[in-house]
Image (cartoon, grey):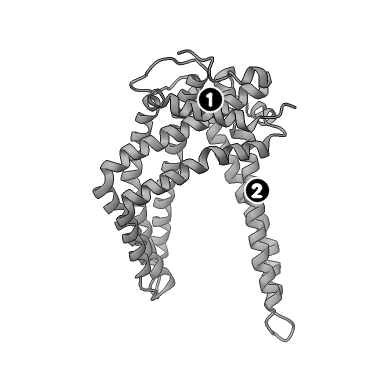
Amino acid sequence: MTSLPVGATVRQAYSFAIRDFLRNLAIVWLSEVLLGALVVLSVPRLLDTLAHTLADISGHHPNFIALAAGGATVMRYAMLLAVAGLFFRAQIMTGLTQRALGQRAGYAGVYLSLGATFWRVFGAYVLIFLLLMAVQFAATLLLVLPAIALAGFSHGTASGAARPDLGMAVVAFFVLWRIALLVVVTYIFIRLSFVVTAVIVAEQRFDLIRAWRLVSGNVLRIFVIGLALFVPIILVLALAYGLIFGDQIWALVHTLAHAQPHHGRKLAADLVQGIAGSVRGLFKKRGFLLVPLGLIAATLEYGLAAAAGVAGYKLLVSGRGNGEASLSSRAA
């Protein structure tokens, strides 16, 4: 088993993401603009539909037909955004991984690929997404019976007296279940996704099993690599977004704080409607800043992810000696 060196992988990833930023931007920008346009068109409508659906069922005589129709609409928008996100992520990661492997040189003013390599990457992303969703769904089903049993016990003794200790046990059970599910999902995600794009692009084949086996024994190191790569970027971006969009964020907080809690569902409808209005205001007043800031963030984040995957792939396949030069040996 080859141990993945954390420091070397992080250094190579940052070097690729920063030094080759403009070349990477040429691959990223079209997919990000198209995805951003889809989000701008879809998210406000999704929130409006959700708010209207909640409003329809907030009265004394809820309209369950409207609930079903609204739920179907929300699901369509959610699935559209999920599939589109995977599609454009596969586009970007395929192009950047090819660059990191030395398969693509120079600048590409517009990058859009529909070749076999892209479809393999996209298929892998869809399969991983569905697998993770299935794991969470199965875990939720497995939770139902013990949750019902614990809830039944927590309602008290034979005399009907409350049992606070068992009530706390139910809460603790749910918290521990969520933590365990997060650990399991994170483990599966790391094992399948860290080098899968590099495997597909470098070896020209669809092989999730090889991607799973390559990172065996390195999950904790990869988790640390992820923290080292993305926590600093997230903090810097959070600060930038706070400085640029602070007034819009405050307007949203003010709207939520002053929602009238007349009824649970009515409150939820008010909150969603307030979020929809704030999102529209953000797009209208700050849209010209969202585009460049979003492109900078996406180029850095995808560059780090692609470079770390390629560096890890070469280090794990060839050993540390060859891996140290993994991203410096590509075409100029």
Which residue appears farthest toward the left when viewing the image?
285
Residue at 72% of width from left, 26% of height from top? 2
Residue at 66% of width from left, 57% of height from top? 177
Secondary element at tag 1:
helix
Q: 75 above or below 171?
A: above
* Residue 173, percent from left and from top: 68, 63
Tag 2 residue = 183
207 vs 80, nearest the viewer = 207
Q: 130 above or below 143?
A: above
* Residue 200, percent from left and from top: 57, 23
Three-letter residue code for mark 2: Val
Label 2, residues with CA under 10 Å away: few <14, some 14-19, many ≥20: few
Secondary element at tag 2:
helix
Residue at 66% of width from left, 26% of height from top? 210
Q: 44 above or below 330?
A: below
140 vs 244, nearest the viewer = 244
Residue at 38% of width from left, 27% of height from top? 25
- Please give left or right for residue 37 compared with residue 268 in the image: left
Location of residue 110 (image quadrant): top left
* Residue 123, percent from left and from top: 53, 30
Tag 1 residue = 120
Measured Cα–Cα span from mark 1 to mark 2: 27 Å
- Please give left or right for residue 233 compared with residue 282 in the image: right
Q: Pointers 1 and 2 in contact (CB under 8 A)?
A: no
Three-letter residue code for mark 1: Arg
| Residue 204, visible in the rendered structure | no
